[in-house]
Amino acid sequence: MTTTAPSTTSLAYSLRELFRSNDIFIALALVVIIGLMLIPVPSGVLDLMIVLNIGLSFGILLLSIYFFQPSQFSVFPTILLLVTLFRLGLNISASRLILLTGEAGNVIFTFGHIIVGGSYIVGMVVFVMLMIIQFMVINSGASRVAEVAARFTLDAMPGKQMSIDADLNAGLIDENESRRRRKAIQSEADFYGSMDGSVKFVRGDTTAGIIVMLVNIIGGVATGVLQRQMDVMTALQTYTLITVGAGIAIQIPALLVSTAAGLIVTRTRTDEGFGKDLVSQLGNFSTLAIGAGVIGLMVFIPGAPKLPFIVIGTVFCGAAYLVWRASQVPAVVPVVEKPLVPEAESPQAMLEMLVVDPLELEVGYGLIPLIDEERPDNLLRRITGIRRQIMQELGLVLPVVRVRDNLRLPPQAYRIKIRGQEVGRGELMLDRSLAIPSAEADTRLQGVPTTEPAFGLPALWIAESDKGRAELSGYTVVTPLSVLSTHVTEVVRDHAPDLLSRQMVKEMIEEVRLRAPATVEGLIPDLLSLSDVQAVLRNLLDEKVSIRDMVGILEVLANNARITRDTSILSEAVRQTMARTLSNQYRDEDNYLHVFTLSPPLEARLRESLVQAEGGLGLQIDAAFAQAILTRTGEQMENLAQLGHFPVLLVPRELRLAIRRLVKQALPNLAVMAFSEVSSGTRVQAHGMVDVS
């Protein structure tokens, strides 16, 4: 077997791609940090690393100031871990050099002899003070703030997501903006959750610094006395001074990073920089003027130094003057000259007006409080609930509901529009509740007479103080928001076929294709077109039959599409497979389906009148006979309604479609079921017959 060596070109390409990746630098940095811990390094390299540590710390501190929002610095927790490991590596390298050679480079020498004056006692005091400031003040406060911020951010996530859903339902944002906001919320939660833990890195680093200093002093004294034959005081002074210098050189960057962490977790979300917010919020003329006056009075305290008070007082006076002068400058408003001839609309802008919203809700200005997001229960949240309810009941994905204010409407009025046309209207009284009387309700209740908009029932607008009395008197009392949401729900149910667009049908089929590809394969577009499937689904929604089981519906269509492409007949075929769904939709809690039927003579006469019509079967009867059927059917519906049952007309399968078309316009709330659509186990109770003899 022959082995072919990789070509030089492919190897060079692989190396080039490797170094193009930014992750390679992170990996190299980790290798360097581990090397500092394990391998002795020369003092010159240690000097370079200490200066690099100081530069990185200053850079992190400056970055924490210039970010507008804390979550924009999302890599800060990881950076905190890396720089903490880097400092620990420097501590180990410095300790190794101190114990082996008695020195640790020029940078540490500078911190030990120049900054603390060559006194190891002063160095110890300065080092301990730095540790106290970092550990007890900055780290403790930052840790507590990060913990509280993480808890509050996680608790607020559901409310923020509901607010995004409400804005999406109201049409204030689109799907892309909704995804962007959700991603921002998730990033913010991840950031504060990470900060809650990463602040502990710095706190642990401070503790480790103290322990390393003590170990170095003890080990240095032991090395000087036992190996280099120094006396105890000389060894203590030599190694303590070097150790304190190393500790200060390494812990000052740690203090800077701790400060950066504190700035990050204490920052609030803002659209401006930290400096601009600080100046705008602290630049108060009254505060600065009073402060200047108080400091100026301190000049006259006997024995007090004059110059410091004069300098600081002058600074405060200058700041107060600058703030006052800035407040006196009028805002410059740019003047835009309007053209004498109005600019014509572009063709693209005119074409956008061709696409109307599927569902709109217009409200008068008096009903705008219902949309207030600060309310715990507002219209936008109700619309979100309506969308879920319609999906569960009918399987219809409700399009975005556009909520707009309309100054042309009366203040308390609203109207509902389907594809630009008004289909419902009503008026609300926000300071009252709607009381709907039952059959045994006390009619002496005082209120403003009105009509309940969803079902057309007589009702009263009553004061809040009469709410308890109305409920005790047999009234059903609902809030104005519930009246509006109920009306929207009923309008959606009645116009569900109009809201099912071809685009939505396509998306539903694509979802089925992803989950059950065999269901769609060979059906669309081979046997049925997209418009045929849409027509079948609209026929089902027209009779309030759920289309949620799209897989089952498409399987029935695939089985029958080779026989006929008549969408009405295909809809009937789908209904025959949904006997359990239809029976569950209309039967009562005792498993009874309360119905009325056709008399045998009427049934026989209608069979003889069946003819093939456009879009399925129809009845060829005269107008008087049709009117008599509708009148008797209406009487039977009234009888069932008085008994508290939903009106259902049970007919033979071959007559169902024709009778449904006959009663659709005059009796839209009548459910027409075939005998074959009653599921097994459902008990049927007949309450009458339609007889026109």
Image (tube, grey):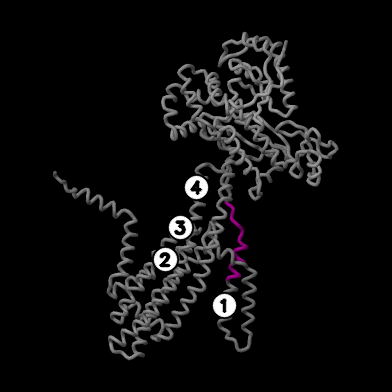
Q: On the image, numbered disc 3 is attached to which residue?
A: 74
Earlier sequence position, callout 3 versus callout 2 = 2
Would you say residue 323 sits in the magenta stretch?
yes
Q: In the rendered image of this protein, does residue 643 appear above or below residue 177?
A: above
Q: Disc 3 and disc 4: Cα gap in Å?
A: 16 Å
Sort mark 3 into few (<14), some (14-19) or many (20+) by Cα contacts within 10 Å: some
Classify residue 684 as left or right of residue 183: right
Give the Cα distance between marks 3 and 2. Answer: 16 Å
- For the residues labelled 1 and 2, say whether their Cβ atoms are less than 8 Å apart: no
Q: Residues within 10 Å of mark 2 (few under 14, many from 20)?
A: some
* Nearest to viewer (mark 4 / mark 2): 4
Res. 406 visible in picture? no
Q: Secondary structure at mark 3?
A: loop
**Separation of residues labelled 1 and 3 (CA atoms):** 40 Å
479 to the left or right of 272: right
Q: Main secondary structure of the magenta part?
A: helix
Q: Disc 2 residue type? A: Gly
Q: Which label number is shown at residue 180?
A: 4
Dot 4 or dot 1: first in sequence order is 4
Q: Position of residue 189 (x, y in %)?
A: 51, 55
